[in-house]
Image: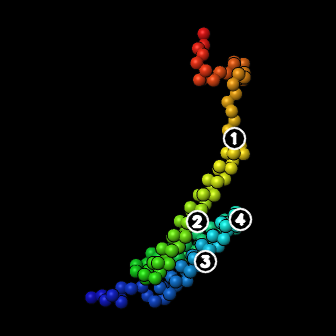
Amino acid sequence: MMTGSSLSLPAPARAALGPALELLDEQLGVLSTALQARDAQALQAAADQLVAALEAAGPMLREPRALTPALRRQLAYAVGRVAAHREALARATASVDRAIEVLLPAPAPAAGTYSARGYNERAAATGSAWA
């Protein structure tokens, strides 16, 4: 019969998970700073480092009973920060889209001009009939 202590993750593996989650938290901080600075190169570098940190922590997180309640809270906090960054990035993207629409309005349809074939192009909503 197995006891509860024999089913838990070995102490060295659990000890390695704490620093891995701290590295994730640190990389999220770097990502946050890059977002606030609106520095595209720093943002890309921070995102790449965050992906590498996630890949390093992944195998440890997949171990059964790897997460203690404290580590679960730390991971939940990190997930919340990622969601906040995603929301901030979506807002910034929407803001840029609105600015582009104001600066570069859609071209107005050409009414009363001739097409490439020489026919007069008429708007569809004029109500006139072709004879």
Mark 4 vs mark 1: in front: 1
Q: CA distance from mark 4 to mark 3?
A: 18 Å
Question: To which quarter of the image does residue 114 belong?
Answer: top right
What residue did someone put label 4 on? Answer: 39
Secondary structure under tag 4 reads loop
Spatial separation of the CA atoms under disc 3 and disc 1: 42 Å
Kind of residue sitting beneath label 1: Pro
Discs 3/2, front: 2
Tell me if residue 48 can be seen. Answer: no
Which residue position holds label 1? Answer: 105
Dot in front, 3 or 1: 1
On screen, 40 above or below 17?
above
Is residue 119 rendered to the left or right of residue 63? right
The three-letter amino acid code for the residue at tag 3 is Glu
Q: Which residue is mark 2?
A: 85
**Mark-to-mark CA distance, 4 and 1:** 27 Å
Q: Point out the tag, 3 or 1, that comes first from the N-terminus.
A: 3
Q: Earlier in the sequence, mark 1 or mark 2?
A: 2
Q: Which residue is mark 3?
A: 26
Q: Residue drawn 51% across and 82% down?
A: 17
Q: Say what amino acid the circle numbered 4 marks.
A: Asp
User: Dot 1 lies on which element?
Assistant: loop
Residue 52, quarter of picture: bottom right
Residue 27 location (% of width, % of height): 61, 74
Q: Is residue 14 above or below residue 85?
A: below
Label 3 secondary element: helix
Question: Quick one: label 1, few (<14), some, or many (20+) residues within 10 Å?
Answer: few
Measured Cα–Cα span from mark 1 to mark 2 = 30 Å
Q: Residue at x 72, y 19 (%)?
A: 118
Whole-percent x, y for residue 21 in the image = 54, 79
